[in-house]
Amino acid sequence: MKRRNLLWYSLLFAAGCTTGVNSTNNSSDQIAITAPKNLKFAVTDVTGIEDLQRDFGIFRTTLEGILGIKVEFFPVENPTAAAPALLSREVDIVFAGPSEYLILNARAKAIPIIAIERTNYHCIIVVRADSKIKLLSQLKGKTIAMRTVGSTSGHIAPTKLLIDAGLDPKTDFKTVMLDDRGVQALKKGEVDAWATASDRYENILESEGLIEKDFSVIFKGPLLPNDVFVASNHFASSFIEDMQSRMIKHQDKLIQSLVTAKANKKYKGSKLILANDADYNIIREVYQKIGQGNFL
């Protein structure tokens, strides 16, 4: 899923979101009462209704059949606009990237429902094939191209890898946010390294007309936190558990319907698992260490 500038949108969020949390009904026999007649569904990085229909139309129809509830699209203006919409009950379910999930959870007390685990979702650090840099620690004093502020694979994860290698992100290296242009900057020698996602690497090289032998991957990180479906906290826990059960049971249909869209091919071969909030602590940790923990 595409990542936007989390810090910038957090400022927009702060201006438009008010606090307030509704208690969750824990009675398992209330599901018939609490199950809504329809669900409003948003995707944090898809803004227009036409784009939602293009990328998630078949998925929406499939989900509607599995849940037995009408599902309607709710377009959001930016990645964190779903938080005030959750609080005001304008939206019920949101599909979010890891960074956006932290905002939704911290500010709107969104409840994680199901995560989608990708089989090849790692952060990689790339240098030129002729570079003398072989270790992350050798990037001290160097310039590193990353994607956008808040990108899980293109900012948060590589920063964590560099911190683990003993580097201070505030003083030991320079970061430039170049989106997918980082590979061209690396080829031209404008930067010393480039951070990207393993499942985007070959696609980016192909789209830029570059060949893999000109580059060297010096480090591949562990699997990254998953994109996640979250729900408004006004739902009863029994209803959320029912959604979880149905989505897990019918995950083959859901994944198949999701990857029919070109934008979602990265989810091919993925599986749905129960979401675990602790899996996102890696992102919380990095924001604290770069001095931006107040956004979460």
Image: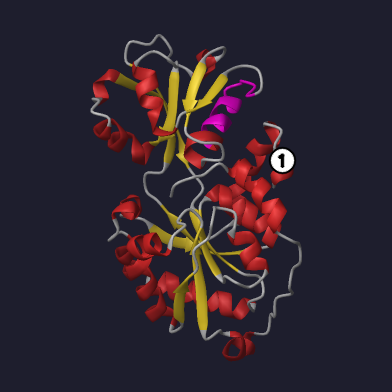
Q: Is residue 211 above or below residue 242?
A: above
Residue 127 in view, yes or no = no
Q: Is residue 1 visible to the viewer in this orientation of the structure? A: yes
Which residue corresponds to the image point at 44% horizontal and 15% vertical from the top-left?
192
The residue wearing badge 1 is 293
Q: Measuring 52% from the left and 14% from the top, which residue is drawn there?
A: 142
Label 1: how many Cα within 10 Å (few below 14, some 14–19, many 20+): few
Range drawn in magenta: 157-169
Q: Is residue 70 part of the magenta span, yes or no?
A: no
| Residue lying at 36% horizontally and 56% vertically, measured from the top left | 270
Residue 77 in the image: above or below residue 221: below
* Residue 117, percent from left and from top: 43, 54
From the viewer's side, name the closer residue of 259 and 47: 47
Say which quarter of the image contains residue 84.
bottom right
Residue 112 image-quadrant placement = bottom right
* Residue 213 versus residue 247 in the image, above or below: above
The picture places residue 95, in percent across and down from the top left corner, at 49, 60
> x, y percentage for residue 138?
51, 13
Kind of residue sitting beneath label 1:
Gly
- Side of 196 where 103 appears, left or right: right
